[in-house]
């Protein structure tokens, strides 16, 4: 059983340590610092790594910076487009910062 899923297209960046943050809605804001999470792919729920949560912080869409985008391995316009696709109309996000513990 996995604790969190990511779209398959981000798997490579996560296991390479290039993506160290994810922006989620309130339904996934309950994770806490120090927790280790089993990570699966959204499409098939196949486990692919374990991450440790560093921090969970509320952030508004308009407060996203180049630093958030860098931690996503994207540009800020790319990141905003991705969020608009996944969470249309949502302004209140939660930045979950994590580090890779083990890749599958
Ligand atoms: C079911 C569900 O919501 N799955 C999600 C949600 C978000 N994300 C990624 O987090 C960042 C900002 O949203 C971007 O990199 C997103 O692609 C993801 O991979 N999978």
Image (cartoon, rainbow, N blue to C red):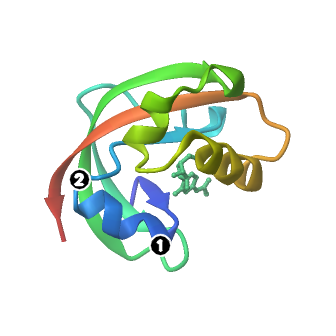
**Whole-number angstrom distance, CA of label 1 to CA of label 2:** 15 Å
On whether ligand 1 comes within 8 Å of the CB at mark 2, the answer is no
Query: Which of the two residues, 104 or 13, is positioned nearer the viewer here?
Result: 13
Numbered tag placed on residue 39 in the rendering = none
Specify few, some or many for label 2: CA neighbours under 10 Å numbering under 14, 14-19, or 20 or more. Answer: some
The residue shown at (53%, 68%) is: 42
Helix, strand or loop status at disc 2: loop
| Residue underneath mark 2 | 17
- Judged left or right of residue 10, residue 34 is left
The picture places residue 47, in percent across and down from the top left corner, at 33, 71
State which quadrant residue 59 falls in. top right
Residue 1 visible within the image? no
x%, y% of residue 68? 47, 32
Residue shown at 46%/73% (left/top)? Answer: 45
Determine which of the numbered discs, if any, sits on residue 8 in the image: 1
The residue shown at (22%, 61%) is 16
Instruction: Say whether mark 1 is within 8 Å of ligand 1.
Output: no
Q: Residue furthest left?
A: 102
Circle nearer the N terminus (1, 2)? 1
Q: Is residue 58 visible?
A: yes
Q: In this picture, is 87 found above or below 2?
A: above
Horizontally, is 82 left or right of 44 in the view? right
Find residue 44 and report its horizontal and vertical position in percent.
Answer: 50, 80
């Amino acid at each position: 059983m996995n604790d969190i899923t990511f779209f398959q297209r981000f798997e490579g960046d996560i296991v390479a340590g290039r993506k160290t943050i994810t922006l989620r809605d309130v339904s996934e804001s309950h994770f806490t610092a120090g927790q280790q999470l089993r990570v699966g792919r959204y499409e098939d729920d196949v486990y692919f790594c374990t991450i440790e949560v560093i921090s969970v912080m509320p952030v508004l869409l308009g407060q996203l910076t180049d630093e958030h985008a860098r931690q996503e391995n994207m540009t800020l316009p790319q990141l905003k487009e991705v969020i608009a696709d996944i969470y249309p109309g949502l302004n209140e996000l939660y930045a979950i910062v994590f580090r890779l513990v083990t890749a599958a």
